[in-house]
Image (cartoon, helix red, strand yellow):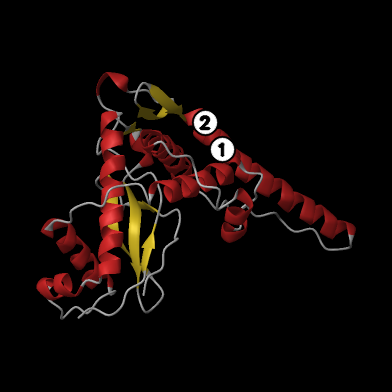
């Protein structure tokens, strides 16, 4: 019997259709196509640049203050930006798809977590546009979780979860699939039903809206549900994959860990 697991939900752009920029819609100025609209490279860069520029300014101000207090001048290293451009695009896509899902269900984004709460948890500035967008993905997920209809889990769904758990070290590798299936707790089963359903719904929206990404953003995976290991790591269980360049390692995006179950 697999040991007790902590299941962790991740609300993100769950649903990237597995296609690059192909055919007549291709443009190097476009990061993504969503329905009849686009997310431009300029939009992605603007959000990313705000974070980088504010961190650079803060670093320069700290250096100047140190020198004013007698510290010796040292070369300034480039700032470490805590986000990547892929994360910016992923968040923008998440919001588009999640907003469409919320509209279809007639729900508004939840009141929490607030921007300040997300900023504190992630060590971001609440003034960054990225933080504000990122916080909204949390609130939309929170609003959608109770209104999606649970999915009927297939053996394929469960076998994929079982293989991820055993391969990732979050379950007893000696347990058979049938043992895993028969001993899966009702609470964990409900979590899987919810997040498989949410994944399917968001992916259908993305498919209907013909979501396509610029190939420069590479191979991406978006984790919706994961399990913790005894060593403190996390194993993705419910994953939506966007296939970019096949010779690159996947770029994995996790946005929010919000549910813990023993």
Residue 179 position in % (x across, y down): 13, 76
Q: Which mark is residue 43?
A: 2
Splitting the image into 4 quarters, where does residue 234 fall?
bottom left
In the rendered view, tell whether residue 122 sits above or below residue 243. Answer: below
Residue 249 position in % (x across, y down): 31, 53
Splitting the image into 4 quarters, where does residue 243 fall?
top left
Q: Residues within 10 Å of mark 2 (few under 14, many from 20)?
A: some
**Would you say 145 lies left or right of 44 here?**
left
Residue 47 position in % (x across, y down): 56, 38
* Residue 30 showing in the rendered view: yes
In the rendered view, tell whether residue 93 sits above or below residue 22. Answer: below
Residue 200 position in % (x across, y down): 25, 45
In the rendered view, tell whether residue 166 sits above or below residue 205. Answer: below
Question: Could you tell me how far apart the alpha carbons at marks 2 and 1 are, in whole angstroms?
Answer: 7 Å
Q: Which residue, given by chain and number where applicable, does mark 1 sit on?
A: 47
Instruction: Residue at 48%, 50% (x, y): give it.
Output: 138
Callout 1 secondary element: helix
Q: Which mark is residue 31?
A: none
* Residue 244 showing in the rendered view: no
Quadrant where the image shows the N terminus: bottom left
Quadrant where the image shows the C terminus: bottom left
Q: Residues within 10 Å of mark 1 (few under 14, many from 20)?
A: some
**Would you say 92 lies left or right of 117 here?**
left
Instruction: Residue at 33%, 36% (x, y): give it.
Output: 215
Q: Residue furthest right?
A: 69
Q: Nearer the viewer, residue 158 or 188?
A: 188
């Amino acid at each position: 019997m697999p040991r007790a697991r902590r299941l962790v939900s991740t609300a993100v752009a769950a649903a990237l259709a597995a296609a690059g920029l192909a055919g007549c819609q291709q443009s190097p100025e476009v990061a993504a196509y969503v329905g009849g609209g686009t997310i431009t490279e300029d939009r992605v860069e603007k959000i990313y640049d705000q974070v980088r520029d504010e961190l650079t300014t803060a670093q320069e101000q700290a250096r100047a203050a140190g020198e004013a207090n007698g510290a010796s001048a040292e070369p300034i290293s480039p700032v470490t930006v805590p986000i990547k451009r892929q994360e910016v695009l992923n968040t923008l896509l998440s919001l588009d798809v999640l907003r469409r899902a919320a509209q279809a269900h007639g729900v508004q984004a939840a009141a929490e977590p607030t921007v300040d709460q997300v900023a504190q948890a992630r060590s971001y500035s609440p003034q960054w546009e990225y933080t504000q967008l990122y916080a909204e993905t949390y609130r939309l997920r929170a609003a959608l979780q109770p209104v999606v209809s649970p999915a009927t889990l297939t053996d394929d769904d469960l076998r994929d979860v079982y293989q991820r758990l055993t391969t990732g070290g979050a379950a007893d590798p000696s347990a058979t699939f049938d043992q895993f299936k028969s001993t899966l707790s009702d609470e964990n089963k409900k979590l899987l039903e919810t997040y498989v359903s949410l994944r399917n719904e968001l992916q259908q929206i993305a498919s209907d809206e013909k979501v396509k990404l610029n190939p420069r953003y590479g191979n991406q995976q978006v984790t919706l549900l994961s399990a913790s290991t005894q060593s403190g790591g996390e194993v993705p269980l419910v994953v939506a994959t966007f296939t970019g360049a096949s010779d690159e390692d996947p770029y994995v995006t996790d946005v929010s860990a919000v549910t813990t179950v023993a």
